Image: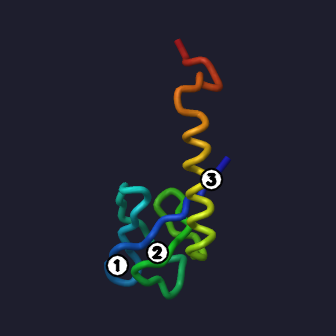
Amino acid sequence: MCLAIPARVIALFGEDRARIDLAGVQKEISIALVEDVAIGDYLIVHVGYAIGKIDPEEAAETLATFAAMRATHEGALPLTPPLA
């Protein structure tokens, strides 16, 4: 299963690299697959690559859903037992 996460662009480096911020975590990623990226844009990011742009409202809704899921499961038992 793959998961792509919305993240906000905070800096651009040349035509194909950007620094993103996701809840305070910053990472440099490739933006070679997405056209016309600007600081402040929200991108869908998967394993270090931007794979598309996302509307800021949709990004906020998705991130709020992730935060609610995390809050619901904090302190819960793991879904699978740890390997011995």
Q: Residue furthest top?
A: 84
Please name which of the two marks, 2 or 3, marks the residue nearer to the observer: 3
What residue is drawn where x is 56% and y is 74%? 56
The answer to whether the residue labelled 2 contacts the one labelled 1, judged by CB atoms less than 8 Å apart, is: yes
- Please name the amino acid that badge 3 sits on: Thr
Asked whether 5 or 73 is in front, the reply is: 73
What residue is drawn where x is 35% and y is 59%? 26
Q: Residues within 10 Å of mark 1 (few under 14, many from 20)?
A: some
Q: Residue furthest bottom?
A: 36
Q: Which color scheme did the rendering employ for the protein? A: rainbow
Q: Earlier in the sequence, mark 2 or mark 3?
A: 2
Local secondary structure at mark 1: strand
Q: Residues within 10 Å of mark 3 (few under 14, many from 20)?
A: few
The image quadrant that residue 52 belongs to is: bottom right
**Which mark is on residue 12?**
1
* Image height of 1 relative to 13, above or below: above
Q: Earlier in the sequence, mark 2 or mark 1?
A: 1
Please name which of the two marks, 1 or 3, marks the residue nearer to the observer: 3
Asked whether 73 or 2 is in front, the reply is: 73
Q: CA distance from mark 2 to mark 3?
A: 25 Å
The image quadrant that residue 54 belongs to is: bottom right
Task: Describe residue 47's horizontal placement relative to residue 58 as left or right.
Answer: left
- Please name the amino acid that badge 2 sits on: Ile
* Image height of 69 relative to 17, above or below: above
Please state the horizontal and vertical placement of residue 30, each as a whole percent of the image: 44, 70
Local secondary structure at mark 2: loop
Residue matched to label 2: 31
Please state the horizontal and vertical placement of residue 78, each as a whole percent of the image: 59, 24
Residue matched to label 3: 65
**Which mark is on residue 61?**
none
Local secondary structure at mark 3: helix
- Please name the amino acid that badge 1 sits on: Leu
